[in-house]
Image (spheres, rainbow, N blue to C red):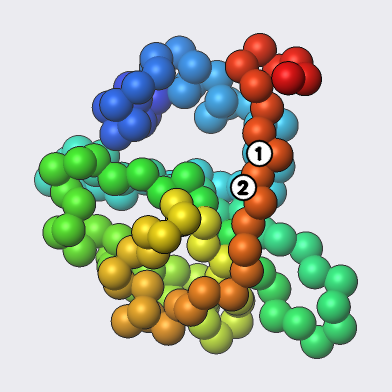
Amino acid sequence: MQDAEALREVYGAGDAEEFAARLADRHTAPGTTHYVVEADGRVVAAFALTSLGRLRPGGRSRLFLHEIKLRSNVRGTGIADDILRWLSTGLGVGSRHELLALTPPGQPPAGFAGFGLTESHHVFKWAVPEGGGRP
């Protein structure tokens, strides 16, 4: 529950019980691992990586970086660069794995270019209305 409360603080919304239920439910995001970034013993960011299966012969495996959320008071302090550096050195992104990163339209993080990330795909969203029914 402590992790769930820390995530609620990072997102600035929701309740700890919902975060705890989502973290415990392996069916919420199959193939996805959720990570937190700590600084001075406090959770300051969260992100998720999903392994994407590929059928293309000879294609590198792909990881999908999403659900990136930083506490507002740590934006611009290099946390996003730290995450990208860890992905590169710790997981082999850019050498063993390709990375697709989901960002808001027109808002690529400044550090992306420094790590060699370039615009590659366009994402389209089929939204689900509140309550889950058709509009």
The amino acid at mark 2 is: Thr
Q: Is residue 32 left or right of residue 16?
A: right
**Residue 127, located in which quarter of the rendered image?**
top right
* Residue at figure coordinates x 32%, y 81% from the top left: 114
The amino acid at mark 1 is: Ala
Q: Position of residue 57 (x, y in %)?
A: 86, 83
Q: Position of residue 95 (x, y in %)?
A: 55, 86
Residue 23, compared with residue 75, is above or below; it is above
Residue 111, compared with residue 66, is above or below; it is below
Q: Where does the C terminus fall, quadrant-wise?
A: top right
Q: Position of residue 33 (x, y in %)?
A: 56, 47
Q: Is residue 102 left or right of residue 32?
A: left
* Residue at figure coordinates x 61%, y 16% from the top left: 130
**Cα distance between the residues tagged 2 and 1:** 5 Å
Q: Is residue 11 left or right of residue 31?
A: left
Q: Residue furthest front?
A: 135
Mark 2, Cα crowd under 10 Å, few <14 / some 14-19 / many 20+, is some
Residue 135, compared with residue 55, is above or below; it is above
* Residue at figure coordinates x 71%, y 31% from the top left: 27
Q: Which residue is mark 2?
A: 32
Q: Which residue is mark 1?
A: 29
**Residue 9, located in which quarter of the rendered image?**
top left
**Residue 14, located in which quarter of the rendered image?**
top left
Q: Are marks 2 and 1 in contact (CB under 8 Å)?
A: yes
Q: Nearer the viewer, residue 113 or 91?
A: 113
- Regarding residue 90, the answer to whether it shows in the image is no
Q: Where does the N terminus fall, quadrant-wise?
A: top left
